[in-house]
Image (spheres, coloured by chain):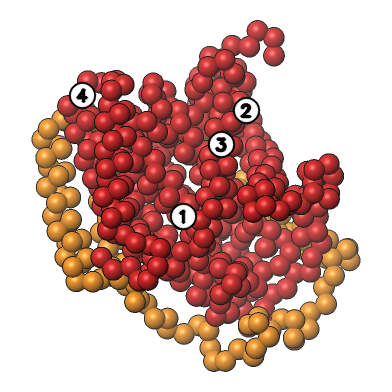
Chain colours: A orange, B red
Amino acid sequence: MLANYGYIGLFLVVAVLFAVSTLLLPLFLRFIHIIPHKPNPIKNSTYECGMETVGKTWVQFNFRYYFYALLFVLFDVVVIFLYPWSVTLRQLANPAFIEMFIFIFIIAVGYIYAWRKKVLEWK
Amino acid sequence: MVGFNPDHGLFSYGLGALPPDWPGNYWLHWGLFVIIIIVFVLAMVMAFIYFERRGLGRLQVRLGPNRVGPFGILQPVADAIKILLKEDIVPAKGDKLVHWWAPVVAFAPALMIFAVIPFENGALLADLNIGILYIVAVSSVSVVGVFMAAWSCNNKFSLIGAMRTVAQIVSYEIPLGFSIIGVALIAGSLSMNEIVTSQNIPFILLQPLGFLIYFISACAEMNRTPFDLMEAESEIVDGYHIEYSGMKFAMFYLAEYVEALAISAIITTLFLSGWKGPLLPPFLWFLIKVVLIFFAIVWVRGTIPRIRVDQLMAFAWKCLLPLALINLFITGIEVIVLPQPLPWLIVFLNLAIMAILVLLWSKFFKLGGGRVEV
């Protein structure tokens, strides 16, 4: 099995190298003057449909999906627990099923509470 | 191809069966499959771009690109050459390092998915026993690249697009994960190859609701048109790749189609019994199913208009997630109560359950007009 992860790691190297070399190709072509390179202040300015951009962009953003992120973490943890459970459910049968039902029920209570509290509305 | 044996297949030649700890064989297997994956992905992406542009043209009662080569077949090639020769513009106020690396981070994970896709029986790069978990993990890395791109541009449109993307992917990740568990329950394994071999009946019949949820969430994950709020041309002018040009833009474009291809391949493997099929060689079956799923994706794109942000979020959290949970428990009960290879009759039961649940939930939701209020 470890050998298989070796394949994955080596493939990651190939994937990154493929992407990087594809991005280096235009640099090379620019070096031999096939691709133009004539930057000027107007061209390099921020595109905003012709308007001058006002104020900074990297500001604190209105993080309106704070609660979504919390719920996401909650359910992602559940999903992680569900994967091993799903593979072995046939052998473990009823007890495992009831346990998982109770586990998800507890989380579903929180989910329904969030729903009733109008957290799931995108305002 | 004389005397073709579908049990052995085009690529296998026993390669998948050989012990991988023998060094020479290890590298041979690795090299062969890396080349196969890259050639397969690039060729299919070219084909898909042509197929989508022509198909979308047909769906919208126009011709689509038909000038370059016979029937416009060379259009993707022409696009590639044109985009390669474009000037590379980097916004002066942006973060140049992040701007350069963002396409790599967006593209590499999309390609990584193919490491565990079985093209034929045992013909895959790495037969991980946690294959589908690996896919869920890897495919969600792409959004980091998208966010890097949007943030590094120092552009308000792209930042808005990125914020929407993150919210969207965070929301649709949950039903995606839950719908896969239904498949894992029936197959009793997370290995992609074993999921295919255990499909005597294609899982689309045993898991119709799971398929529907997976298909919709996957469309949202790869930002196809009903869910492409992050690049909504009419409001935020193409979102995250607004400041990209030349080959960097092409990488994002490529990543989008590689993801579409990957999703088609995953759906084929999980729900349409992968390379299995009568008469034709397995690899061809795999290809046919991938193209069919991609056609469905294009069809959805051509039919359904873009939905609003609040509708998008409500759909994920109030419709898909409860349905996925219900589906999970119904599948769990079926797996425990019924004997090992699930009987044919269960197909009709599952289809009926799906129809009832979808109708019930569609009573709650009116996505047509006005605000969604549940």
Q: Residue furthest top?
A: B3
Are labels 1 and 3 on one chain? yes
| Mark toward the viewer: 3 or 4 | 3
Callouts 4 and 2 close, C-beta under 8 Å: no
Which of B297/B180 is in front?
A: B297
The residue that label 1 is drawn on is: B221
Quadrant of residue B95 within the rendered picture: bottom right
Left or right: where does residue B200 sit relative to residue B274? left
Residue B158 lies, in percent from the top left, at 56, 74
Q: CA distance from mark 3 to mark 2?
A: 32 Å
Left or right: where does residue B151 sit relative to residue B47? left
The residue that label 2 is drawn on is: B28
The residue that label 4 is drawn on is: B338
Residue A68 lies, in percent from the top left, at 31, 67
Q: CA distance from mark 4 to mark 2?
A: 44 Å
Tell me which numbered mark, 3 or 2, is placed earlier along the sequence. Answer: 2
Tell me which numbered mark, 1 or 2, is placed earlier along the sequence. Answer: 2
Task: State which chain disc 3 sits on.
Answer: B
| Mark toward the viewer: 4 or 2 | 4
Residue A59 lies, in percent from the top left, at 46, 85
Considering the numbered disc 1 on the image, is that residue within a helix, a strand or a loop?
Answer: helix
Vertical side of B283 occupied by B80: above or below: below
Task: State which chain disc 2 sits on.
Answer: B
Numbered mark located on residue B292 in the image:
3
